[in-house]
Image (cartoon, rainbow, N blue to C red):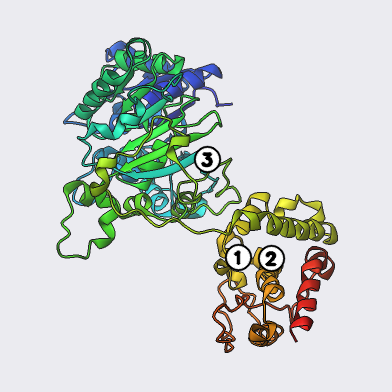
Amino acid sequence: MLPKDSVVITVAPLRLIQDNHVSEFTKYGITSIAINSYTPTTPEFWQSIKKHSKYQHYTVSPEQCGPYKGHIPKFATLVHDPAWAKKIHLLQIDEAHFISSTGQGQGEESAFRPAFSDLGERLRVHLPSTTPCAAFSATMPSKTMAVVMKTLRMDPENTVKVLLSTNRPNLVYSTICMNGTTKNLSNLDFLAPQPLPTDYLPPRCVVFIDDKKRAAEVEEYLNSRLPPHLASKRPFRKYHSGMSKQYLEQIAAQFKSGDIIGLIATECVSNGFDVADIRLIVLLGVAKSVDESDQRGGRGGRDGLECLVLTIAERWAFEHLAANNPDHKPGSKEERTAESSIEYASTKLCKRKFLADYNEDTTAEALLCDGTCCDNDDPSFDLSDFLPGFCVDEDSDSDAPPKKPRRKYRPLVAREPLDDVIRSWRDATHVADSVLKSYPKSYIVSDKSIGLLARERRQTFRIPGDITTFLNESSEWHSRHALDILTLIQTYDYKPALDALDSSDDPSSSSDSETDSISSQSGQHQLDSSPDCSPSPSVTSSRSNSPEPAPSPPPLVTTVGRPVRKAAREHAIAGIADQVSKRQRIAE
């Protein structure tokens, strides 16, 4: 509980967030008021606050805390009064990443809201040194945090950092190449396909666009493509800071109630806009920063159900790697866009992993996903599964960058047996280990991770460190499990070569070379157990000149010099190991 006559100040960047604060705090019996351009300006109102305020909580913009456009706001005068400043029990900064993203200049651009970077001078220095300060954000990697702490004059030795995972397991990430520029509104045809599929209702969505004028054009374009009954009852509507407060409140209420199918919005919806059942987030153009992209994606799926976050990226994002080419001349937006944001749009790696690395999220929850992760993780990923109205414009092939080659995986028929082998090993390990059996089996390796391991081709994993890196596990996990799992996979992969021995018409034509390979590798090819170890010199052997030689198995990793939970391992691989031994004797 607040001490009597004490107040709390929350600095928030947007009126929408301020209104949400007032609503939420009021629910808990905390009297609150938003200080902005709609606040009364009469002397009586401010005099009453100065003498005996009936409000316990003030939510304000940074511009209200100091000189702004040649005058001193009334709230700044109030805060700069030492007697009233002593009443402030706590200072809070919501969406604190704004201190870095809009309070400081980006590239050649000057700061959009410099008042954020002046919060130390505007507000903090006028408060007693004992007044605590708290900063909150879902996008605060270490560089941003350093800027925030310096601006707010937060002593690193006296600051507690609470770091939670920002991963949203129900979000699915995808990127496609834009046809032409953002002026080509046909990039959004999938939101209102013609003809509209039977019983198809466009998903509740937010389309982010950086141009307020373009937002109106998109609204008109999409509504013109809707059937009359939808255009009149569940249309698309623009939403940006240039609209009146009454309009924004009305549109927000209609969107929450389901009377509007989608918003064409600018940055003002990126933070604090809380509607539970948004199923699609579209970024028409690469976001200026990964923070901005993350915030926009965070508007979707807030009820915990699946939501697609789709970036329609300009072509230059895919060509950016060629920036060293003297013929490459970046446009103005490309120059304003953070390198990391361009990398996110064009990466061929897991997008969830990219975001986790960017946000320095090393928690156990960082890479969790409820179903599909992203377009780079699943070779069968198809946007039409999420958007029945989506189709590729066949006429635009020449405008799109070359398609990235589809990753190759282990044949489906070979995955399930390997999946079973790893599960059997895990279950036996869980029972045999006195420490691990008190934890869930997933602490050893989760069902999802087993599925991912079984899906990869055998060439993917050459050393134990490959397993650890692939699953993004710790060094402790590596020392306990990586070598065991690698041995399971590589032992399993002997089966094709062994089967080939049986089917060969002339065993002597290939068995000698195959035997050399197996015997020389078995017991001699050893690897360090460090996550970043390098393989021992590869063992080679001459092969027969037979026109169709049997495939050579991968190097077999041995367990010499390392204690192994033999009971657990043997339970899972005894059958395969027996086959290996028998086939070796036959070959000899």
Q: Is 403 left, or right, of 374 in this rendering?
A: left
Q: Which residue is mark 2?
A: 485
Q: Residue at x 58, y 86 (%)?
A: 543
Q: Is 180 left, or right, of 347 in this rendering?
A: left
Q: Secondary structure at mark 3?
A: loop
Kindly report the distance in space between the C-alpha atoms of the residues bearing marks 1 and 3: 25 Å
Kindly report the distance in space between the C-alpha atoms of the residues bearing marks 2 and 1: 8 Å
Q: Which residue is mark 3?
A: 168
User: What is the quadrant of residue 382 in the picture?
Assistant: top left
Asked whether residue 106 appears in the rendered view, the answer is no
User: Are discs 2 and 1 less than 8 Å apart at CB?
Assistant: yes
Q: Position of residue 409 (x, y in %)?
A: 54, 58
Which-is-in-front pick, marks 3 and 2?
Answer: 2
Q: Is residue 103 above or below residue 236?
A: below
Q: Residue at x 29, y 19 (%)?
A: 223
Residue 467 tag number:
1
Viewer-closest of 310 and 381: 381
Categorize mark 1 by other alpha carbons within 10 Å: few (<14), some (14-19), many (20+): many
Q: Residue at x 41, y 27 (%)?
A: 273
Viewer-closest of 529 and 394: 394
Q: Is 248 left, or right, of 145 in this rendering?
A: left
Q: Amino acid at mark 1?
A: Ile
Which-is-in-front pick, marks 1 and 3?
Answer: 1
User: Are discs 3 and 2 less than 8 Å apart at CB?
Assistant: no
